[in-house]
Image: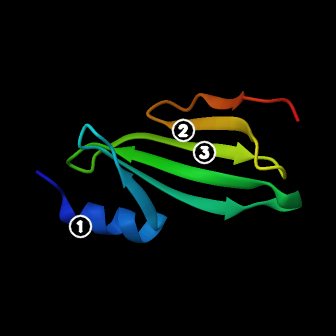
Amino acid sequence: MIDLSKRKSNEKKYGAWEELSNGHRRYFCEVKGHHGWKAHYVKEVDASERTLRFYQEIYNEHGELVEVHEKYPVDKGHSKVKED
């Protein structure tokens, strides 16, 4: 059963989302950082809006993904994707 209040809250907080083929959703938003870098905050939820995964993608000034920081369900710290 979908938790409509959570869905509405996620839609408002993230502003953008995509429906995944398995009934899950991926919410995301972009935050501009220093020196032209940006971060994408990504939250993946199941069909009931329960959080499955939350992570940050860090992009350099050229728009290249350089780092991923998985925070939930286990904080795995920062993982380099590309050396800058």
Query: In the image, what residue type sits under mark 2?
Result: Lys
Q: CA distance from mark 1 to mark 3?
A: 24 Å
Determine whether the residue tagged by mark 2 lies in a helix, strand or loop.
strand
- The location of residue 4, given as percent across then percent down, is 20, 64
Q: Nearer the viewer, mark 2 or mark 3?
A: 3
In this figure, which residue is indicated by the disc labeled 3?
56
- The location of residue 30, given as percent across then percent down, is 62, 60
Residue in the picture at 54% in, 38% down: 71
> For the C terminus, which image quadrant?
top right
Badge 2: residue crowd in 10 Å (few <14, some 14–19, many ≥20): some
Above or below residue 33? Residue 12 is below
Closer to the N terminus: mark 1 or mark 2? 1
Badge 3: residue crowd in 10 Å (few <14, some 14–19, many ≥20): some
Q: Are marks 2 and 3 in contact (CB under 8 Å)?
A: yes
Q: From the viewer's side, name the closer residue of 16 and 5.
A: 16
Determine whether the residue tagged by mark 1 lies in a helix, strand or loop.
helix
Q: Are marks 1 and 3 in contact (CB under 8 Å)?
A: no
Horizontal side of residue 45 vs 33, given as left or right: left
Q: CA distance from mark 1 to mark 2?
A: 23 Å
Residue in the picture at 22% in, 46% down: 47
In this figure, which residue is indicated by the disc labeled 2?
71
Query: In the image, what residue type sits under mark 1?
Result: Ser
Determine whether the residue tagged by mark 3 lies in a helix, strand or loop.
strand
Query: In the image, what residue type sits under mark 3?
Result: Gln
